[in-house]
Amino acid sequence: MTEKLAILGGPKSVLSDPGDIFTWPIITDEIEAAVLRVLRDGTMSGLDVTREFEAGFAAWHQMTYALGHNTGTAALQGAMYGVGVGRGDEIICPSITYWASCMPVYALGGTVVFADIDPDSLCIDPNDIEHRITERTKAIVVVHYVAMPADMDAIMAIANRHNIKVIEDVSHAHGALYKGRMTGTIGHAAAFSLMSGKSFACGEAGMLLTNDREIHERAIAFGHYARHGELTFADLESGAGLPWGGHKYRMHQLSAAVGLEQLKLYPDQMAEIDQAMRYFWELLDDVPGIAPHQPPPDSGTTMGGWYAATGHYRSEQLGGLSVARFAAAVVDEGSKCFPGCNRALHLHPVFNDTDIYRQGRPTRIANLPDGVDIRQPAGSLPVSEGIQARVFRLPWFRRYRPKLIEEHAAAYRKVAESYADLLSDDTETADDGRWGLTAAPRRERG
Ligand SMILES: *Cc1c(COP(=O)(O)O)cnc(C)c1O
């Protein structure tokens, strides 16, 4: 007999103090010293530490060019400009992601066509890309969503067939492997957010990675005027001295100093997180209603730092219990559980009606030929629109502390096994998810 659920007045499952198990980022004495050094040198706006960080980041990925940016959003825009996206061009991007995967295309005069996601990987569905390619399509943005590497082999084959570029958004999957290859090394360019909530946490920062000298130099021309001396392509050199995008995207050297230290710390941290998360799911192997979002063992594909660790929710195995009610019960047991994930971007007004640049037409279609309307109404991307009721965020353990992990797993087991006690009072409607994954959750109990 399991005990009464805490949400119904029973005892909690998690009694131990979490201690440092969720503390992130982990700030060491070495990080503090590195930041102090930059402060005391007065080189916050310099480039020397950033160049060192770029070299280390490139070496970690065995790539040729790394370009530090002040945010991941800026790195994504640099990548888009780098691969040649311009006015009237289209990119294809999954609807389930953080907005920065696609929104910077607007400022280039381009627009976005959304593809649906695969309900298991939660990444762009390779079978929903090709029919969306037009003569205007310049690039596919692939997001390794909540740490799961996307199906890059299938996506690269499509891109190569149509001679379009692939940009990897690696903001959720630092250090993850896809069939033995590092995410961020497979497409034509890759952009990483390195802000503090991400697995590889530097502060506010982003990185652009590529082996293509022209992509690298175009990104320099666009947002790094102070480095125009590095330009070698004649057409770029001819406009050197002022940034082509009017943007100043240089990385802050306090962030670069943190990043240099993180390069040393992250591999071990990633291994510990992986051990902890896999242990959590092993403990729940036989529990109905919930399933891990993780690649098969021995596939050569890994979750890296398990950013925003997510689980699949199967309400049909729990008598139709809503994920919101399930999550509320887990939280009352003393664990962590947030229903849903990002909302489907194609349903937001800025991708439908908003006229950002006062062109007299919605920005989404403002630079397309007359009569071309690529907007995607409700109902057009069914997996993306329904996934919020089918997933939840679980405790993201940064340390391997078996006893504590066992208490959290016990909370999930207890709720799943006692689901019938929750059905009569299930007045929760499925959560719509969040527009920005890193925003504070709307509800946190316990
Ligand atoms: C965080 C994030 C970004 C943007 O990065 P910032 O550093 O916050 O600008 C881009 N794409 C995805 C998928 C993200 O999660």
Image: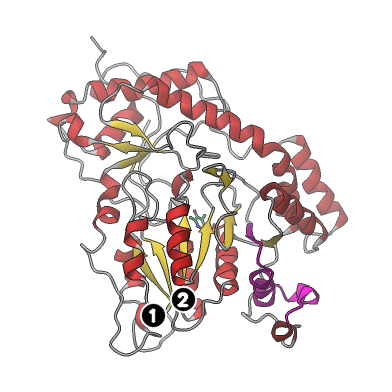
- Amino acid type of the residue tagged 1 in the rendering: Thr
Q: Which mark is first along the chain, 1 or 2?
A: 2
Residue 254, placed above or below residue 356: above
Query: Quick one: SS at disc 1?
Result: helix
User: Disc 2 to disc 1, how far (Cα)?
Assistant: 7 Å
Q: Mark 2 points at which residue?
A: 106
From the top left corner, tell me how far across and down residue 65 is, in percent.
Answer: 70, 61
| Front one among 66 and 391 | 66
User: SS for tag 2?
Assistant: helix
Q: Pick the residue in front: 137 or 262.
A: 137
Give yes or no for residue 169 being in the magenta stretch: no
Depth check: give the residue in front, 366 or 298: 298
Q: Label 1 near label 2: C-beta < 8 Å?
A: yes
Question: Where is residue 346 shown, x and y percent of the image?
Answer: 32, 65
Q: What stretch is highlighted in magenta?
A: 206-233
Q: Residue furthest left?
A: 424
Q: How crowded is mark 1: few (under 14 residues within 10 Å), some or many (20 or more)?
A: many
